[in-house]
Image: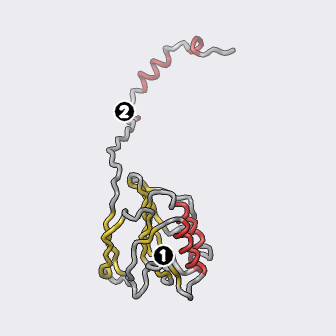
Amino acid sequence: MAHILVSNSFKDSIWCKIGTLLIGVCYRSTNSAIVGTDNNEKLCDLMEEVSTDNMLVMGDLNFPEVNWNLKTVSTSATTDCINFLETIEDSFLLQHVLHPMRGKSVLDLILTRDLDLVNNIQILDHLGHSNHNMVLFSLHHAGCYRDYVVRRRDYQKGDYSSVSNILANIDWDKCVMIP
């Protein structure tokens, strides 16, 4: 597993790669005073960037105006909400959570490009004092597992006097030709 940096400037996300699967967790705040007025644009750019990979994105993206079953938005939907749904559709991403977990809203999403990557989605009880329900699902990914061996030289155990003697006995004038 490796920590991955995406080039996008959307701040509230973390990424890793397991085998060929890019996994991200995102949070979209609705408080523009904290995250700025271009936060949704950055999120849409991020979705476009990662949608070219074998990917799984999970997170609380706070779009209660989207009906994910019908892939429509309510008449009260903001421009940010409309743009996000259009980005998801244009990027051929699939949203797997279809049952509400906070009131009547689906706020916590699971996005992939592969219909069969996740299944057995269950909405569980709240965790602690959270106002969101937990989402449990099965992930089907044949990861690439390798044992990585990292060679590290221990320079404190180097025989530097032998190296110095060898280098001192070389006729450097013969080795280095100066034109």
Quarter of the picture containing the C terminus is top right
Q: Nearer the viewer, residue 104 or 36?
A: 104
Point out residue 136 in the picture as x, y percentages from the top left corner. Answer: 32, 72
The dot on residue 61 is: 1
Q: Residues within 10 Å of mark 1 (few under 14, many from 20)?
A: many
Q: Nearer the viewer, residue 160 or 96?
A: 96
**Which amino acid is tagged 2?**
Lys
Q: CA distance from mark 2 to mark 1?
A: 53 Å
Colour scheme in the image?
secondary structure
Point out residue 20 in the picture as x, y percentages from the top left corner. Answer: 41, 52
Q: Going 49% across and 19% down the picture, which residue do you hit?
A: 167
Q: Vertically, is 135 above or below 78?
A: above
Q: Residues within 10 Å of mark 2 (few under 14, many from 20)?
A: few
Please tell me which of labels 2 and 1 falls first in the chain.
1
Q: Vertically, is 113 above or below 39?
A: above
Q: Going 33% across and 63% down the picture, which residue do you hit?
A: 139
The dot on residue 157 is: 2
